[in-house]
Amino acid sequence: MATIRDVAAEAGVSRATVTRVLHEPDKVSPAKLAKVQAAIKKLGYRPNMLSQTFRSSSARTIVVLAPNLANPFFAQVIAGIVDASDELGYKILVGSTNNSSKREADYIKMVETRLADGIIQMAPFTEGEVSLLPREHVPAVSVAGVPGTPYPGVRIDNVAAVKECIQHLVSLGHTHIGAITGPANNSNTIVRLKGFKEGLEEAGLSYLPELVREGDFRLVSGFSATADFMLDSNPVRPTAIFCMNDEMALGAMRSLKTFNLRVPEDISIIGFDNLDFSAFASPALTTVEQPAYDMGRRSAALLVDMLEGRVGKADADIVLPYRLVERESTAVVHTRA
């Protein structure tokens, strides 16, 4: 493979002249420009794009960090990021970290070495957790995070959204409302549990730990948590279950069928996210709609604005509207004999 040294020897010029031809041709005399271009063509020289990226002020590449690419909510967010970034002239590199600090460090290093320009982080930030972001000189934006993230973000008001879920269930006569959460140390779990407790308190209901089960945002955890609610040894069973995402809600609905319980006639189920499949569940799932695609688009636009100097790193979060989508999985509570 031909090198700059080879091109310079063939053209009879210095390597510095070849470099100027590649990067600043207007500063090279026509005669030398013609010689270098002829040598490049004859030798089939191809510039080292990696080297050019290091010299450039921008790689025009954004790294998107996702804790779990199998999660359909993240897929919708990424779709928005990809579309907006393409319109803005940036490429996207999606990395699945699986909560690995080593993987996160590898992707952050790409920004520090100028192979990429900035990071969109989809893993929620929790104060006190071991995290490699924020890091000086690494522009970062959080998407679908929570208040207090130490870099700009795009999110909804999770607390208000969950409180609206509880208000909806209370309006249907439910007083024994269960919850299936995400992992206890997950910041989205923490803020949604806050909304759950506040919603109960405002309705004059007590928070009962025995009506709460920990899940992991996956289908199977919704299934197993619901099965645990149904054990004969439980002193109290919920008449409605709030699930902190739609995947767990669908797992919960499937679990109830194994106990010959009907949704919503016997137990109401409410989810969170409004994923595409939620409208096609049987019964169709009542849920909170997070504008996932728009959140992705706005996070990409925010990061590009930071990279191009239009906003600073200290700018406040962008809080997008949510809505409660009422479908068939919630109904008026039935009095038990």
Image (cartoon, helix red, strand yellow):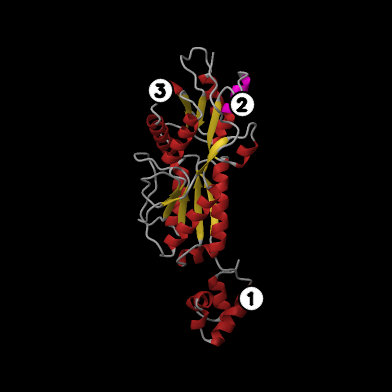
Pick the residue in front: 103 or 290. 290
Image position, residue 94 (x, y; %): 54, 50
- Examine the structure image and report whether residue 255 is included in the region drawn in magenta: yes
Q: Nearer the viewer, mark 2 or mark 3?
A: 3
Residue, disc 3: 208
Q: Which structural element holds mark 1?
A: helix
Q: Which mark is residue 6?
A: none
Amino acid under label 3?
Answer: Leu
Q: CA distance from mark 1 to mark 2?
A: 65 Å
Quarter of the image that includes the N terminus: bottom right
Quarter of the image that includes the C terminus: top right
Image position, residue 233 (x, y; %): 49, 12
Q: Looking at the image, is mark 3 or mark 1 earlier in the sequence?
A: 1
Q: Nearer the viewer, mark 3 or mark 1?
A: 3
Q: Is residue 292 visible?
A: yes
Q: Is residue 145 left or right of residue 81?
A: left
- Examine the structure image and report whether residue 54 is included in the region drawn in magenta: no
Q: Nearer the viewer, mark 1 or mark 2?
A: 2
Q: Which structural element holds mark 3?
A: loop
Could you classify mark 1 by the number of other residues whose Cα lies within 10 Å: few (under 14), some (14-19), or many (20 or more)? few
Q: CA distance from mark 3 to mark 1?
A: 76 Å
Amino acid under label 1?
Answer: Lys
Residue, disc 1: 41
Q: Looking at the image, is mark 1 or mark 2 earlier in the sequence?
A: 1
Image position, residue 25 (x, y; %): 52, 80
The magenta stretch is 252-258
Q: Are marks 3 and 1 in contact (CB under 8 Å)?
A: no
Amino acid under label 2?
Answer: Arg
Residue, disc 2: 254
Q: Is residue 218 visible?
A: no
Q: CA distance from mark 2 to mark 3?
A: 24 Å
